[in-house]
Image (spheres, rainbow, N blue to C red):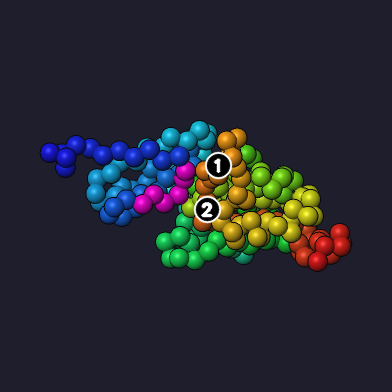
Amino acid sequence: PKDKVPSFRGVDYCGWVDGSEGYCFMKPGGEVLGASRDGMRCFYTGREAPDESRGSLEEWQQKIALPALKSSRVVACLGVGFAGALFRLIGMPSRGLNIVGKSGVGKSTGLKAACSIYGSARPGLRFGSCDTSRGGAEAIMARANGTLAILDEVQQGNPKFIEKIALTLGNEAPRTRQSINLTLRRQHSWSEGFLSSSEIPPQVYLLRHKIT
């Protein structure tokens, strides 16, 4: 009988995976959290490197969550990080927060603490830099679907690109691109939290470069 045969589904993206009855959650790198009530088993078919998760929940609470209570910036970053997994479930668009402050006040510390909710804060996973192309930012956002995307140091980015970051995040999809045979290329969308940091407000940075 069909109901006696295990069902499997290959998934090449992270975030929430719809089943006929409920959801499971695919972390970047392939770890599956939960299972659909219909017995569907998901496995990761993507090529991304593991997210390098370490330790236990109790260790995270003691080493990250408790010390974070001393800094409103870190608490805000953690809030955005946790919210990233909820936006799709509650039907809200992706949202983010830019942390402004002088060097050494803990901006990057807050961003890395938020990264620790899902795995490593090592550059190249979900912790990126604004010194990238639009395509690079889209790749980071697509990989972070259902979790948290980070682009650090706004002032290092190309002003014309910085202007489009918020639109790129809010569109929840990359620009339409074609394949070599003139058909639409399959691309992944996203729904997630977003964090960035800067020493001056982004709007001031853009005005200095005469972008309004």
Residue 38 x/y as whole percent: 24, 49
Relative image position of residue 86 (x, y in whole percent): 45, 60
Identified at 45% across, 60% down, the residue is: 88
Q: Name the residue nearer the viewer: 116 or 123.
A: 123
Q: Position of residue 175 (x, y in %)?
A: 62, 50
Report the side of 203 relative to 208 (left or right).
left
Nearest to the eye among marks 1 and 2: give it.
1
Residue placed furthest toward the left: 1
The residue tagged 2 is 190
Q: At 45% from the left edge and 49% from the top edge, which residue is drawn?
A: 15
Residue type indicated by callout 2:
Trp
Give the magenta range.
13-18
Instruction: For residue 31, say whether it is visible.
Output: no
Q: Secondary structure at mark 2?
A: loop
Local crowd size for mark 2, using a 10 Å CA cut-off: few (<14), some (14–19), many (≥20): many
Q: Which mark is residue 183?
A: 1
Q: Nearer the viewer, residue 57 or 62?
A: 57
